[in-house]
Image (cartoon, rainbow, N blue to C red):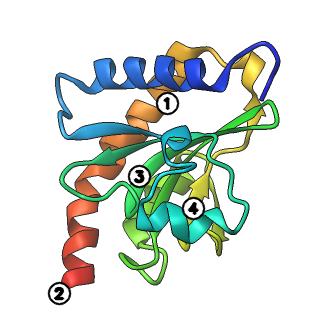
Amino acid sequence: MSPNRDAVEFHQELADSVIAELSTDLSRVSAYFGEQYADADVPEARDIRHLDVIFDWITFGFDPHSMWDAHVGVLTNDGRVTVGLHIHERLSPTRPAAVVDIAYGGGAEYRSSDAAAEHQFNLPSVSIDSVDIDNLAEEVSAFCRRFEPMVDDLEEASSG
């Protein structure tokens, strides 16, 4: 993490901005803080903890779905920050075409995360010191607005 910006404060400031931005039109979004899961007795956290996964992240999930299944994630690590759309493989064993379209249209690149068992569509990382929190909140909010309508369909497809 950059010496100029504390991760916990950064995550909280971003959460406050995104939730405020989305409060009028996307009330089912919730923020989840990685640092709260680093030692938590939650199955998904336990599953990845032994893999030396870092918990320097904040995610925005869509109630009533588990944030572990689908979220817009913001990873802060080594003085860098990146935003991505993340889908657990249990919801979709392959990359959903609609998500590919919005992710690639937004400039994201695909990677499969074996550690998290996720399809990840991440924007290029940037220096955290160069990030304007309001601009980042707008970017995250835009991804949330485009991704949220698809989460229900992913959930239905995985259970059907």
Distance CA(mark 1)–CA(mark 2)? 32 Å
Mark 1 or mark 4: which is in front? 4
Query: Is residue 27 in view?
Result: yes
- Residue at the image point whose x is 40% and y is 78% from the top: 92
Q: Mark 1 points at which residue?
A: 139
x, y percentage for residue 114?
65, 75
Mark 3 or mark 1: which is in front? 3
Q: Earlier in the sequence, mark 1 or mark 2?
A: 1
Residue type at mark 1 is: Glu
Distance CA(mark 3)–CA(mark 2)? 21 Å
Q: Which of marks 4 and 3 is nearer the N terminus?
A: 3
x, y percentage for residue 139?
49, 30
What element does badge 2 sit on?
Answer: loop
Distance CA(mark 4)–CA(mark 3)? 10 Å
Residue contact between numbered discs 1 and 2, judged by CB atoms under 8 Å: no
What element does badge 3 sit on?
Answer: strand
Q: Mark 4 points at which residue?
A: 120
Residue type at mark 4 is: Gln
Q: Name the residue under label 2.
A: 160
Indicate which disc residue 68 carries: none
Q: In this view, does 26 lie to the left or right of 96?
A: left
Q: Which of marks 4 and 2 is nearer the N terminus?
A: 4
- Determine crowd level at label 1: few under 14, some 14-19, many 20+ residues with C-alpha closer than 10 A: some
Q: Which of marks 3 and 2 is nearer the N terminus?
A: 3
Residue contact between numbered discs 1 and 4, judged by CB atoms under 8 Å: no
- Residue at the image point whose x is 68% and y is 19% from the top: 6
Q: Name the residue under label 3.
A: 71
- State the residue in front, 151 or 36: 36
